[in-house]
Amino acid sequence: MRFSWLDLLDIAIVSYILYRLFLLIKGTRAVQLLRGLIVLLVFYYAADWLELRTIKFLMQNAGIMVIVAIPIVFQPEMRRALAHLGQGRTLFPSEPMFTKGKEFFELIDTLVVTARQLSTRRIGALIVIERETGLNEYVETGTPIDAKLSSELLLSIFLPASPIHDGAIIVRGTRLVVAGAVLPLSENMRAALSPRQHLGTRHRAALGLSEVSDAICLIVSEETGDISVALQGRLHRHLSEESLQKLLLSHFQPEVRGTSPLTPLLRGLGRRES
């Protein structure tokens, strides 16, 4: 049997795909599923080797039930994986765009300064920064603003006396598009109901949106003044002003390069359909 360079290429491609898929499911419930499948496979092959027919029969039927249950139980994770694949980031991770300009750093400074002011005054807030995934379906649930983003504007919106302080604001580029937007609550009930987390509606809504999009969700708790960021289905809590700035700078990408050749087309279709 000859081993050619095509075989090596085949192995390299499969290894890379498996590696990217592992990074995608890392930190989600799918990791526990993978461990369970490995245990089932070990039992199955052990039973086959030892000729334990009853155990082998049970393992075969259990495997069929697992295959049927996967799309039902892990619907949120599968939806998130398909969304990432459509953005061209699962197999072709994006790189930061061109040198970030003045407006970009002004946006980051505005968000950090506003978060600090809201935290100090214990004013609850939920700020969503749109990235590649279009958020028009949530934009339509809010009150149109369409104004240049500023700390003064954000503070005036989130003051308890404001009629639109409840809900999320959505930022697109350097403009505040809407206020009072309604977001989907997180489907990760284990995190939502955890006694250690004490997640309120804002945190669950931010997590919910981050599970179905690549948006950055900035949350300020009105009870504790704690600053958090929900990103890719994960919640980063107890952020200081400095750590918030670092997180935004490292994850915020207005545009990308080095993605799949289909990414621009898929991005455009996503925005038009949403």
Image (cartoon, helix red, strand yellow):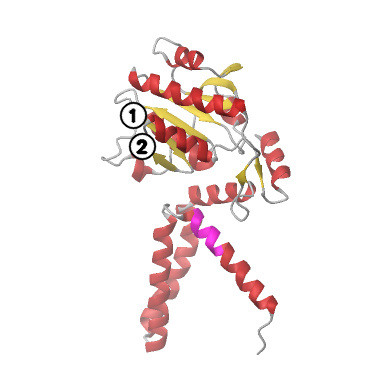
At x 37%, y 81%, the residue is: 54
Residue 187: percent from left, percent from top: 43, 42
Residue plotted at (39% across, 65% down)? 36
Front position in the image: 61 or 89 = 89
Up/down of 266 relative to 127, above or below: below
State the mark number for residue 118: none
Residue type highlighted by circle 1? Asp
SS state under label 1: loop
Is residue 19 within the magenta segment? yes
Whether the magenta-drawn stretch holds residue 273 is answered as no
Residue 15 lies, with reference to residue 48, above or below; the image says: above
Sequence-wise first label, 1 or 2: 1
x and y, in percent, of residue 91 in the image: 61, 56
**Residue 138 falls in which quadrant of the image?**
top right
Query: Which residue appears farthest toward the left when viewing the image?
Result: 195
The answer to which of 196 and 154 lies nearer the viewer is: 154
Q: Which residue is mark 2?
A: 237
| Type of amino acid at the residue the image marks with label 2 | Arg
Write down the residue under mark 1: 226
From which residue to which does the magenta span run? 18-24
User: Which residue is rendered at x = 41% and y = 13% of the image?
Assistant: 159
